[in-house]
Image: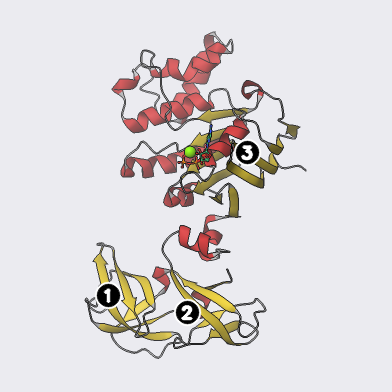
């Protein structure tokens, strides 16, 4: 069966700017899909193409098995929640939510019941009579969401839906958004440039760069098995070691140079191949004394930042290789190392990501 959304070699040019560059992507019905990327990489343009506010310079967009070429925005099974959504200030919350339904001709008990169920969905059932200015930012956000869902679109496009909220409210609203999406089973495509938000929300994330998709995967795979140093670096913190394969067996490689690092690796890499090893901060252990573990390296503490729940360190080897690591705060551990102190890091070969770009 064809996927719910199919983008086939889509490009969008604005004069000499290539906003979307030969991009192909399938999204299944009911997915909560996130587009993540730096400012200007083409996220909003991709949403606008799906909504029909722009038409592609090249390529085909299919939604629900139908070619969208020439189909007006209002005739697509799609609704859009803009970043700077505006509620009608003079209308009550309930009237805001019902606005699109009334315009489509719905009246009476059908309208009242639909609005009521939407108010319940976004947990505002006691506040239907209020005006937008009598709500908190998060509540207004939920009204906007209910309004966008009112006509039961099959696809909801959300462009930075939580950007206006402060951190705490944003985190709560993220969980709510996931809940609502699961309840309805509506396909959501959410644009964000906040990686933590994408990780929290999405079943799958597409990392976008310069109009192209660099990797599309589940959050865990993107984080633990990035396919390029761009993705590894974009998502979270990571330390890179540039090296050359010095020896190998069936399941691992060892690099040459002064760092004798062993990394799990199934790829058939020849001796002499240039690689980039990447290690996440929470996978690196730091101790004052030698432990005899594999991949143990002597380091000096260059920098540390106490975060309460953990301490972030930057440590350096004698040859100048830097590692960034995070150590959880636990009573059972030694007192944390301090600035300038010598210690030892070690990490499991399984936790070393081998990249070849
Ligand atoms: N109507 C337009 N005319 C000309 N150039 C445009 C137009 N819309 C977008 N662009 C350009 O296309 C590129 C992609 O823009 P887009 O708005 O899709 O980025 P974005 O990923 O949404 O960025 P942000 O995170 O800042 O919102 C940018 O270089 C932008 O300047
Ligand atoms: Mg944008």
Point out the image quarter for the N terminus. Answer: top right
Nearest the eye: 291 or 191: 191
Task: Report which residue position mark 3 lands on.
Answer: 12
Q: Earlier in the sequence, mark 3 or mark 2?
A: 3
Label 3 neighbourhood size at 10 Å, few (<14), some (14-19), many (20+)?
A: many
The numbered mark, 3 or 1, whose residue comes first in the sequence reads 3
* Dot in front, 3 or 2: 3
Question: Which residue is painted at 61% across and 38% down in the image?
Answer: 13
**Disc 2 packing (10 Å; few <14; some 14–19; many ≥20):** some
Residue 40 sits above or below residue 300 on the image: above
Percent position (x, y) of residue 93? 40, 19
- Answer yes or no: do the residues labelled 1 and 2 have beta carbons within 8 Å? no
The one of 291 and 56 positioned closer to us in this rendering: 56
Label 1 vs label 2, nearer the camera? 1
Q: Which mark is residue 302?
A: 1
Residue 220 got which mark?
A: none
Tag 1 secondary structure: strand
- Tell me the element at label 2: loop
State whether residue 329 is above or below residue 186.
below
Closer to the eye: label 3 or 1:
3
Task: Identify the secondary structure beneath mark 3.
Answer: strand
Q: Say if mark 3 contacts mark 2, CB within 8 Å.
A: no
Mark 1, other Cα within 10 Å: few <14 / some 14–19 / many ≥20: some
Residue pointed to by mark 2: 348
Percent x, y of residue 317 = 35, 82
Q: Position of residue 287 (x, y in %)?
A: 31, 82
User: What residue appears at the point 52 percent right and 65 percent down from the top-left corner?
Assistant: 229
Q: Quadrant of residue 53?
A: top right
Q: CA distance from mark 3 to mark 2?
A: 44 Å
Which quadrant does the C terminus fall into? bottom right
């Amino acid at each position: 069966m064809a996927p719910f959304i199919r983008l086939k070699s889509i490009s969008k040019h604005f004069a000499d700017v290539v906003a979307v560059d030969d991009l192909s992507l399938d999204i299944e019905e009911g997915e909560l899909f996130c587009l993540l990327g730096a400012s200007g990489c083409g996220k909003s343009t991709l949403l606008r193409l799906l909504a029909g506010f722009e038409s592609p310079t090249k390529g085909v967009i299919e939604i629900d098995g139908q070619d969208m070429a020439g189909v007006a925005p209002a005739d697509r099974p799609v609704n859009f929640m803009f970043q700077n959504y505006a509620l009608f200030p003079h209308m009550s919350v309930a009237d805001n939510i019902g606005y699109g339904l009334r315009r489509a001709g719905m009246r009476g008990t059908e309208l009242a019941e639909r609005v009521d169920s939407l108010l319940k969905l976004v947990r505002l059932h006691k506040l239907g009579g209020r005006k937008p200015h009598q709500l908190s930012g998060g509540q207004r956000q939920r009204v906007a969401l209910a309004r966008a869902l009112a006509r039961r679109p099959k696809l909801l496009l959300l462009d930075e839906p939580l950007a206006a909220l402060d951190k705490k409210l944003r985190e709560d609203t993220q969980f709510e958004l996931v809940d609502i999406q699961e309840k309805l089973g509506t396909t959501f495509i959410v644009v964000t440039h906040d990686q933590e938000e994408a990780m929290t929300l999405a079943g799958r994330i597409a990392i976008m760069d310069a109009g192209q998709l660099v990797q599309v995967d589940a959050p865990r795979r993107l984080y633990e098995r990035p396919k390029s140093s761009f993705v590894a670096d974009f998502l979270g913190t990571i330390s890179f070691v540039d090296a050359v394969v010095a020896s190998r067996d069936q399941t691992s490689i060892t690099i040459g140079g002064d760092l004798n690092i062993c990394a799990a690796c199934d790829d058939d890499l020849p001796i002499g191949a240039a690689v980039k090893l990447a290690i996440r901060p929470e996978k690196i252990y730091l101790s004052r004394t030698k432990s005899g573990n594999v991949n143990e390296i002597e380091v000096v503490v260059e920098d540390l930042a106490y975060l309460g729940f953990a301490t972030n360190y930057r440590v350096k080897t004698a040859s100048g290789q830097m590692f960034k690591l995070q150590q959880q705060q636990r009573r059972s551990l030694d007192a944390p190392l301090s600035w300038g102190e010598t210690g030892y890091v070690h990490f499991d070969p399984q936790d070393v990501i081998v990249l070849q770009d």
